């Protein structure tokens, strides 16, 4: 009792301190900017709402706001926005987004007044901690305060604070923000919201407000039907409302769901609650007793309890569990082992064992059980670093957000100070390597760290290393018996042993094998073992089949289709139309085209599908169905829609993509002549400027290519022709972005459509696309064949502009092949036609082609004169691409004449113009030219920097030819340094060695 009174005093003192800190924070916060994350991402500065810019710019702000006062490296920003699919322009895009955010956060600053809120550091960017408030931080603060109030028996105050916290939500967290970071943070905040809802309901029950609790929990269970804690509370609420049948049905519903989706039973706590309700146990009637028992379950000292739920059907690992328990909770009441690492192959059950062991010894760690998934083996998601994990743990241990150190060493020291004299267990799941967790080791005596990883931790100090192999045969057979039924396994013990061996004793493979047996009750264990013995089919057979998944999806679809709510029925139609268009993601604009409905109707339908967990929001107004949902949607479309309905819906979607791509092309570079596009009723997406257009093109490129390939292979000629024209609309984006193979694939598909339909216009355009692709692949001979074919067709069609374009491109190919006389002939004809039809862009191009041919023939003076004329015309027109096209050969001529300084100036100007329009393929060629010129000028430091940039860009664009040029130049720079007076130390510094 004395200990309890001391502990309660300590708790009350800590609570008062926290409340005072919160009050001081509220008084001191003077930041003029606020960011809403709990819903559509919005921002306010100076009390006025501000436009935070395009989705990816918002994503940058969210990443920085999540780590205030900490440097976020450019690499981390890139990974947070794009993961493993970063575009080649990612780094430049980061600069653009940061510049945009600075204009928003500090509109009065500029070149003469340095920015002070979002500042540059050597490794990245830092957002001042005091510069920005977020509602997510406030939500977590209210949530923590509500828990303290509940623990202090102030239930009314706790309920009000829970209500205040939950009222801050206006929609899905980080709604409209794309990228891996947003996905992980969205999931974290959603988990907090659901937990807060459960804890609020717990308080309602403790206050005797059972009907309110039942209403709130019914909504919560509808949103997250597999959450066992919510179901347990709902059962209690129903029971106290006199609805015993509903309470029991709530359990049975979950039992069916878990069996269908996961092949498991409800957990022990829920089963115990079911049994108490079944026999109308008197303990359920007393809210005070219930509250006290729940409070005791949760510990009486407010220690964090973050462990995931233990696996319901955990089997085996008896020796490993015994050893872990002896290490973590020694029988002589001594201190636990400081660090334990559980390692082994994927699927060995490392995490399940660690969680099971942590729960088994939880009573020995009264001051907290902390948990973090470090995402070490999760593809496409950035791993948690030591500072982030430390920050989370410190906040869980009561350190205010504003008091969490921003440096790893300081944060680690604060954690050690916080845990001094305490007994806490930290479970670090899925560590990538020892360096990821090193700051969390060396805790005070009495604390323990339990780690799981695929990597060895043999080199960790004071660490016991536990390596997991496969389960023994008897344990593996027991797992199968738990999943598939003991009688079924016992009927053929030899086959069961063989099946366990074929699964390698790995728990993951055993669970999948058990699921297969559950799905196929007519199979014997021997049948499955025979299938697995065919090693070509093993992985295929070790999958949970589609039958249960399909039936589950059908239930969701039918529920929407039969609903009285119009939005539900529209959502069912949307799910069906998702199967018409085979792309990875859709936006409300695309769905509007598929449905032939207004965009706002389509957006509501997608949001409804998202709430039903049939699609997931992945970025701003962008939704992605799970692969199995996509397959189900294709089946639905085939079954529910006629061939004509499918074709019309697909044509509408293609129309939207093509109209938007043409709009984007014009915004990016209004001087490029666009391929023809059919007159369609679909309106383009509301793009406003070049940056917006580039972002749309990058985000939709894969989808538009997929739609093009799907359409061009469609047996319906109308769909195939629309697909060909959609592919043509991608031409400039693919050409200048270096997407050569995609360009080639689309050109070949269009040529097949032309051959099938007999459409000469499409045939000519397809040859043009193929020649552009071959040109970028440095296959001038192949490109020439297609340009010659295009020229013949354009002359037959009587298309003078098409003829002019073909002549110009053919001239360039002839010059590339060293056939300068033929190149000159084509360029002169091109110039003649351009002036006849009044095409200024054609005239500029023809002048450049003429100059290139003349240079090849040795007439440098005439070539230079024509290039200067073309450059002047391009400057007047504001055509960045043509200015750069002129400056490249001008630099070559100056260099050949020995005027290296002028050549360097031309190349530097050319790069400025190319970067203005984002033409990276051409930028790579100019960089290689510039490196050589700078090397010859003796400017070796600048030459090396540009060579490294060229080498990196060549890798990004998959251009081995120019990559080899950059590598040779780097070697030449090394040799040049060796032949100068440059000291070895200075040379090594320049070369970065």
Image (cartoon, grey):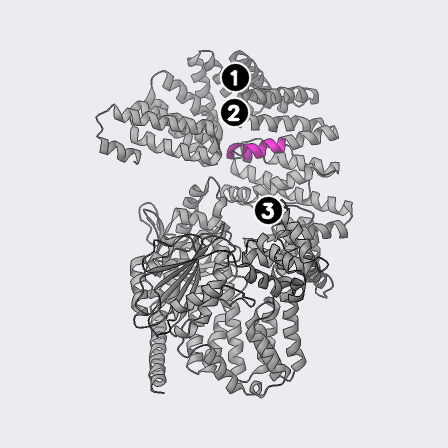
Q: Which residue is the site of mark 1?
A: 817
* Residue 46 in sight in this render: yes
Residue nearest the observer in this picture, 472 or 543: 472
Q: What residue do we see at 29% from left, 60% from top?
A: 410
Residue 178: image tag: none
- Most frequent secondary structure within the magenta stretch: helix
Residue nearest the observer in this picture, 536 or 690: 536
Asked if disc 1 and disc 3 are in contact, CB closer than 8 Å, the reply is: no
| Label tally | 3
Mark positioned earlier in the residue sequence (2 or 1): 2
Q: Residues within 10 Å of mark 3 (few under 14, many from 20)?
A: some
Q: Where does the image place residue 691, in percent across and percent down from the top left?
A: 49, 43
Q: What residue do we see at 44% from left, 21% from top?
A: 889
Q: CA distance from mark 2 to mark 1?
A: 10 Å
Q: Secondary structure at mark 3?
A: loop
Mark positioned earlier in the residue sequence (1 or 3): 3
Q: Which residue is the site of mark 2?
A: 778
Quadrant the N terminus occupies? bottom left
Camera-near label (2 vs 3) is: 2
> Left or right of 193: which side holds 118?
left
Q: Which residue is the site of mark 3?
A: 685
Q: Which region shows up in magenta? A: 734-747
Mark positioned earlier in the residue sequence (2 or 3): 3
Q: Residues within 10 Å of mark 1 (few under 14, many from 20)?
A: some
């Amino acid at each position: 009792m004395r200990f309890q009174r001391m502990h309660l005093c300590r708790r009350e003192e800590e609570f008062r301190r926290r409340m005072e800190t919160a009050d001081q924070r509220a008084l001191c916060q003077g930041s003029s900017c606020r960011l809403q994350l709990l819903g559509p991402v919005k921002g306010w500065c100076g009390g006025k709402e501000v436009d935070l810019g395009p989705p990816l710019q918002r994503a940058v702000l969210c990443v920085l706001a999540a780590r205030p006062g900490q440097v976020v490296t450019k690499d981390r920003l890139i990974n947070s926005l794009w993961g493993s699919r970063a575009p080649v322009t990612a780094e430049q895009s980061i600069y653009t987004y940061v510049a945009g955010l600075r204009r928003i956060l500090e509109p009065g600053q500029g070149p003469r007044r340095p920015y002070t809120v979002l500042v540059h550091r050597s490794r990245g960017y830092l957002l001042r901690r005091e510069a920005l408030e977020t509602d997510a931080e406030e939500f977590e603060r209210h949530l923590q305060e509500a828990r303290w109030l509940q623990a202090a028996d102030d239930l009314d105050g706790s309920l009000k604070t829970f209500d205040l916290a939950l009222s801050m939500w206006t929609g899905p967290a980080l709604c409209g923000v794309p990228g891996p970071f947003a996905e992980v943070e969205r999931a974290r905040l959603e988990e907090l919201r659901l937990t807060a809802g459960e804890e609020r309901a717990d308080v309602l029950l403790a206050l005797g407000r059972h009907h309110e609790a039942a209403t709130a929990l019914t909504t919560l269970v509808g949103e997250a039907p597999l959450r066992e804690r919510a179901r347990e509370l709902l059962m209690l609420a129903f029971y106290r409302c006199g609805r015993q049948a509903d309470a029991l049905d709530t359990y049975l519903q979950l039992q069916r769901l878990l069996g269908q989706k996961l092949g498991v039973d409800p957990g022990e706590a829920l089963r115990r609650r079911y049994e108490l309700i079944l026999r109308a146990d008197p303990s359920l009637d007393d809210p005070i007793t219930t509250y006290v028992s729940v409070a005791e379950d949760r510990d009486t000292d407010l220690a964090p309890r973050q462990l995931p739920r233990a696996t319901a059907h955990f089997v085996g690992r008896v020796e490993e569990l015994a050893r872990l328990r002896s290490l973590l909770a020694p029988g002589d009441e001594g201190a636990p082992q400081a660090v334990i690492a559980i390692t082994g192959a994927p699927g060995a059950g490392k995490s399940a064992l660690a969680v099971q062991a942590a729960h088994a010894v939880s009573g020995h760690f009264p001051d907290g059980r902390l948990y973090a998934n470090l995402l070490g083996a999760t593809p496409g998601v950035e791993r948690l670093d030591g500072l982030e994990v430390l920050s989370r743990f410190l906040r869980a241990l009561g350190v205010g957000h504003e008091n969490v150190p921003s440096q790893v060493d300081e944060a680690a020291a604060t954690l050690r100070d916080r845990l001094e004299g305490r007994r806490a267990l930290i479970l670090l799941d899925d560590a990538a390597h020892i360096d990821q967790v090193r700051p969390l080791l060396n805790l005070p005596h009495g604390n323990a760290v339990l780690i799981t990883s695929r990597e060895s931790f043999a080199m960790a100090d004071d660490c016991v290393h536990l390596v997991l192999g496969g389960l023994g045969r008897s344990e593996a057979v027991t797992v199968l018996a738990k999943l598939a039924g003991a009688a079924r396994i016992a009927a053929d013990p030899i086959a069961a042993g063989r099946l366990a061996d074929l699964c390698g004793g790995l728990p993951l493979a055993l669970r999948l094998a058990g699921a297969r047996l559950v799905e196929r009750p007519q199979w014997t264990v021997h049948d499955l073992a025979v299938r697995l013995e065919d090693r070509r089919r093993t992985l295929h057979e070790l999958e949970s089949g589609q039958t249960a998944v399909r039936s589950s999806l059908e239930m969701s679809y039918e529920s929407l289709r039969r609903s009285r709510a119009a939005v539900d029925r529209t959502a069912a139609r949307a799910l069906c139309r998702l199967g018409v268009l085979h792309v990875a993601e859709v936006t409300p604009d695309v769905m509007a085209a598929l449905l032939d409905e207004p965009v706002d109707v389509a957006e509501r339908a997608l949001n409804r599908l998202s709430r039903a967990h049939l699609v997931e929001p992945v970025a701003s107004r962008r939704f992605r169905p799970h692969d199995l949902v996509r397959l189900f949607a294709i089946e639905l479309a085939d079954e529910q829609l006629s061939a004509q309905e499918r074709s019309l819906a697909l044509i509408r979607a293609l129309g939207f993509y093509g109209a938007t791509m043409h709009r984007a092309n014009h915004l990016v570079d209004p001087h490029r002549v666009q391929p023809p596009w059919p007159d369609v009723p679909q309106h383009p997406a509301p793009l406003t400027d070049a940056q917006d257009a580039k972002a749309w093109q990058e985000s939709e490129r894969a989808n538009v290519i997929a739609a093009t390939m799907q359409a061009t292979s469609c047996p319906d000629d109308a769909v195939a022709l629309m697909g060909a024209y959609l592919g043509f609309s991608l031409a400039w984006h693919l050409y200048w972005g270096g997407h050569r193979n995609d360009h080639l694939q689309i050109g070949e598909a269009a040529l097949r459509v032309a051959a099938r339909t007999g459409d000469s216009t499409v045939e000519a355009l397809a040859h043009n696309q193929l020649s552009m692709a071959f040109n970028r692949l440095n296959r001038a001979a192949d490109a020439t064949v297609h340009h010659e074919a295009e020229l013949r067709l354009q002359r037959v069609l009587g298309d003078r502009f098409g003829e002019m374009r073909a002549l110009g491109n053919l001239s360039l190919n002839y010059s590339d092949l060293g056939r300068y006389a033929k190149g000159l002939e084509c360029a002169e004809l091109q110039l003649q036609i351009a002036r006849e039809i009044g095409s200024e862009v054609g005239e500029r191009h023809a002048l450049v082609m003429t100059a290139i041919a003349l240079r090849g023939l040795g007439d440098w003076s005439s070539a230079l004169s024509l290039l200067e004329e073309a450059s002047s015309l391009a400057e007047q027109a504001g055509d960045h691409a043509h200015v750069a096209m002129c400056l490249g050969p001008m630099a070559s001529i100056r260099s050949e004449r020995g005027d290296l300084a002028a050549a360097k100036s031309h190349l530097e100007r050319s790069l400025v113009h190319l970067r203005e329009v984002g033409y990276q393929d051409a930028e790579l060629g100019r960089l290689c030219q510039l490196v050589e010129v700078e090397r010859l000028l003796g400017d070796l430091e600048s030459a090396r920097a540009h060579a490294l940039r060229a080498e990196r860009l060549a890798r990004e664009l998959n251009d081995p030819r120019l990559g080899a040029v950059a590598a040779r130049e780097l070697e030449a720079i090394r040799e040049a340094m060796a032949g100068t007076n440059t000291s070895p130390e200075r040379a090594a510094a320049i070369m970065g060695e």
